[in-house]
Image (cartoon, rainbow, N blue to C red):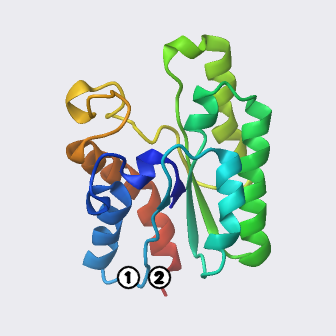
Amino acid sequence: FLGDSITAGYGLDISQAYPALIQQKIDAKSWPFRVVNAGQSGDTTSGGLNRIDWLLRNRINVLFLELGANDGLRGLPADTIQKNLQAIIDRVKAKYPDAQIVIAGMKMPPNMGQSYSKRFESVFVSVAKRNNAPLMPFILEGVGGVRDLNQPDGMHPTVRGHQIVAQNVWKVLEPVLRSLVK
């Protein structure tokens, strides 16, 4: 799980973040996958690109890519975000050609403007299509904007919010993992 503060479980114990909850689901099925939470608060797509070689030291069967929100909040060009996401995927595929990629999309708050928000959201769709990768259109589906499911900052999920995120991630990730179990 290469991501930002959402993946890192900002404000919570790492055991409460959605990647740890996904590991519990994997363990319940006795599947041979080990989740690595490579979430880093404040990370951008360029930060993820800088960190990907570190992750590639270990075999990657599936890369769940959850980056871009901080780029969007900084108003970085959609083309730059897309190039960085694609470069991350290209590096993974160069080292592990059979690795599966899952893309987690994000949405921008209304104050970023409708035009920018549309371009931003289309990045994830485009990258997923280009790489024939499953797309989770909005990582915070059912959680984003729901006061009781977010910490006081209104941006980072609570423990319950992460449980919902994990359920949503599992819907996309479980079929990918199932296809890899021999």
For the residue carrying disc 1, how many other residues have a C-alpha within 10 Å: few (<14), some (14-19), or many (20+)?
Answer: some
Circles 1 and 2, Cβ within 8 Å, touching? The answer is yes
Under circle 2, the secondary element is: loop
For the residue carrying disc 2, how many other residues have a C-alpha within 10 Å: few (<14), some (14-19), or many (20+)?
Answer: few
Mark 1 or mark 2: whose residue is earlier in sequence: 1
The disc placed on residue 21 is: none
Residue under pointer 1 = 31
The disc placed on residue 181 is: 2
Q: Is residue 121 visible?
A: no
Whether 126 is drawn above or below 61: the answer is above
Provide residue 155's location: percent of width, then percent of height.
38, 31
**Residue depicted at 45% across the width and 46% down the height:** 5
Provide residue 89's location: percent of width, then percent of height.
72, 60
Q: Amino acid at mark 2?
A: Val
Provide residue 145's location: percent of width, then percent of height.
34, 24
Q: Would residue 76 be found to the left or right of residue 138 on screen?
A: right
Q: Residue 118, located in which quarter of the rendered image?
A: top right
Whether 173 is drawn above or below 41: the answer is below
Whether 28 is drawn above or below 116: the answer is below
Q: Would residue 1 be found to the left or right of residue 68 on screen?
A: left
Provide residue 38's location: percent of width, then percent of height.
51, 62
Q: Amino acid at mark 1?
A: Trp
Q: Residue 75, located in which quarter of the rendered image?
A: top right
Q: CA distance from mark 1 to mark 2?
A: 7 Å
**Residue depicted at 80% across the width and 72% down the height:** 94
Under circle 1, the secondary element is: loop
**Residue depicted at 60% across the width and 76% down the height:** 60
Q: Is residue 44 visible?
A: yes
- Residue reaching furthest to the bottom: 182
Q: Would residue 28 be found to the left or right of residue 93 on screen?
A: left
Mark whose residue sits in front, 1 or 2: 1
